Image: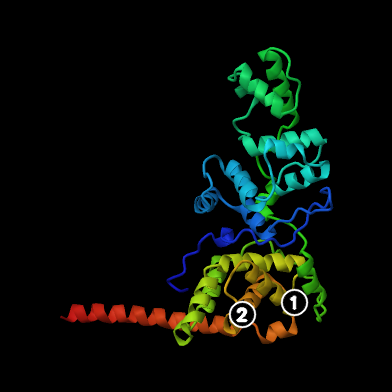
Amino acid sequence: MATKYAPQNRYFCDFGHAMDMTIVSSREGGGRLNYDASSLDSLYRGRLVELRELAESRNISKGGSVEVLRARLIQNLVLEDLDLSWDGIQTMSHNELGGILKVFGIKSSGSQRERRQRLWLHLNFDSRRMTIERLAEMDRDDLHELCVRLETPLTGNRTVLMGRVAGVLTNQLNGWGRIKKSLKRNGVSFSLGSVEKEALANNEEEFVPVDADFHSDSPIAVIEDAYDSLILGLDTLEPVIQEDLRTVATFVEDIDRIIGTILRGSGGAWGESQKELLLRLSKRRGWPVNEEIVRSRLTRVATDIAEIKGAKIGEFGKVNGNSFLREQVSSDVSRNRISEKLSVVDSILQDSKN
């Protein structure tokens, strides 16, 4: 393992490059709700400290619980082009509301009004704090405002208004405020977009789907090995290529996640189409993969990771796998470490003699 490698939460570095991951196609006028599924997957599985780091880097408020922050990031980074104010929510169709609720990872069924209520609650409150017990602490004006936003009748005294809000909260119980456990555990389960489907459809090799779990991240040893492979022998390369490889290497955890996503979409197959898809997604994220050396090294490392994950490697993949890189990295790094330790021992022995 290279001593410079320090795993960082790089999943969140490049939002905004949509993958045409369509989940709703019911907007008036035939528009579609598109989002970067890889970014959304990272937000679903992100821990509080990771989400706070992302929020701070994007000048987004990082206050609140992990679920409140997660919803805020999804709103501002994944669905940034949508008007999710109360007025904007009122203009959305039944199907569109269902699709947006799915993106936020919460319950998406119910009537159109129930969907509006649930979305507005999820975007504006912490479910742990917005409870029936807390309603007792609110004055009539606050309760009246809640009734307006939750689309309930506005007449009556404070007790009547509190009862109406309590009725909505009871009806929406466990439907908002936190993403589904399956999403937090496994992330997004999605099909590939049109570009990706075309890449897989053009695959010339026949693959038999394999029985393997591609949801899990690779062990840290694999990530470290991949990092070492990407930056192997940098001093022999041109400065521009050195910088490109260093940049790509910092996204090694992202690369691992993308490989798993591609394998899920291709039934465990890893061949030329999958490599091209990886390069295409890398370019969309703004990674410097234009140089042939960088592209070649990235696909070799990716092939090695895919094989470790249990993918069925095609003929070309077998020939150009990254196993020789892994062996070279292991031997070079081990040799360097042993040499360093021997030097330390020699130094200690010399000091003891003196």
Pick the residue in front: 221 or 57: 57
Q: Which mark is residue 240?
A: none
Q: Secondary structure at mark 2?
A: helix
Q: Quadrant of residue 193?
A: bottom right
Element marked by disc 1: helix
Image coordinates for residue 108, horizontal then vertical, percent: 77, 42
Residue 230 percent across, percent down from the top left: 54, 77
- Residue 109 screen position, x and y as percent: 80, 40
Residue type at numbered disc 2: Arg
Which residue: 60% across, 65% down?
A: 254
Q: Nearer the viewer, residue 168 or 284?
A: 284
Tell me, yes or no, if residue 44 can be seen here: yes
Assess disc 1: are there few (<14), some (14-19) or many (≥20) residues with their C-alpha within 10 Å of its C-alpha: many
Task: Count neighbours of disc 2 (C-alpha within 10 A) and say few if under 14, some if 14 to 19, many if 20 or more.
Answer: some
Residue at which label 2 appears: 295
Quadrant assignment, res 333: bottom left
Q: Is residue 207 left or right of residue 249?
A: right
Q: Identify the residue at image location x=61%, y=58%.
A: 15
Query: Position of 103 compared to 349: left or right?
Result: right
Number of numbered discs visible in the structure rendering: 2
Q: Amino acid at mark 1?
A: Ser
Pointer 1 or 2: first along the chain: 1
Q: Quadrant of the C terminus?
A: bottom left
The disc at residue 273 is 1
